[in-house]
Image: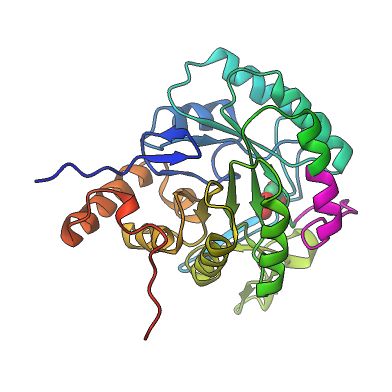
Amino acid sequence: MKKIDITASINGIKLPLCIMNASGVLCTTDQELSNLLNSYSGGVVTKSCTYKPREGNISPRYFEWNIGSINSMGLPNLGINFYLNFLEKNKINKPIFLSISGLSTEENYLLIQKANQSSKITAIELNLSCPNIIEKKEMLDCNFDGISNFIENIFRFNKKPLGIKLPPYFHDIHIKNMALILNRFPIFFVTCINSLPNGIFIDVNKESVVIRPKKGFGGIGGSIIKPFALANIHKFYTYLRKDISIIGCGGISSGKDIFEHILCGATAVQIGTQFMKEGVSVFERLKKELIFILEKKNYSSLNNFKGKLKNLQ
Ligand code: DHB
């Protein structure tokens, strides 16, 4: 049997396995992050942090059903200093992605400055797409001039590998515009996609919504968003500079789902809803399932099929 290589290199950042957690899921506290360091996960992404700790939104703020999840967490996190201290205290055995999500551009500059002072962070994942903040005024997602200015300012001082977590886009022109902006900067990766914003799930017996914040509106994740994740990954793969890696995120619950993400152009993947359902054992299961598919298809590495999705003739 050939040796099968399912490691990944995100623009030079080496992951021992191409599968890691998605920011937000079981990566907020000391215990959760320790569990991730001790798991098969190929990297650790921390909960999106702000400058000061936050309690987040009122509960219940997360709900899942067979094919999806809805959340309106509201950025509960322990503040950037907690995450920097955690990394100082613990033995780091894999790449660490510090996710940051300031409530304003000024706060993001401050967070990136702080992250630059830590030698333990492998890369910053700048989250441009949190949909659940009640007090948030700016929404940069589709403000392309705003984003361009913002990133330009970041690269005036940032020295750390930096990637951007993107929202789902639903129009080709939005992806094209975003990619053309990103292509002008030394960005390491993009993560596609964040949850689909502003969905509702209904409990038919109670005739009510299932989460309390924002009258039940929240970000949708899980299997039902996979087609949108795949489409965004594939479009970004065609428009982005080839040295900008894509981390696929959205609707992965099996090795087959990972195969599809990579076929669309992902270099590595993140697991959100399914990690929440299954806990840290999900990484080993998915690793086995992915290897099984590659064996069957006679592929020895992810590059054999990455981005090679075919059209019908
Ligand atoms: C939260 C949700 C997100 O989708 C995100 O990107 C960041 C934070 C939250 O509600 O905590």
Residue stretch in magenta = 132-151
Q: Is residue 109 left or right of residue 30?
A: right
Q: Position of residue 302 (x, y in %)?
A: 33, 51
Q: Is residue 89 left or right of residue 50?
A: left
- From this view, report whether residue 217 is shown above or below residue 164: below
Residue 140 lies in the magenta-colored region = yes
Q: Where does the image place residue 193, in percent across and percent down from the top left?
A: 59, 58
**Can you say which quadrant of the picture contains the C terminus?**
bottom left
Query: Is 56 or 222 nearer to us in this picture?
Result: 222
Which residue appears at 64% of the width and 64% of the height?
168
Q: Residue furthest left?
A: 1
Q: Is residue 59 visible?
A: no
Q: Measuring 80% from the left and 42% from the top, which residue is drawn there?
A: 152
> Can you tell which quarter of the image residue 99 is in?
top right
Q: Farthest residue in the top direction?
A: 89
The color scheme shown is rainbow
| Residue 256 falls inside the magenta stretch | no
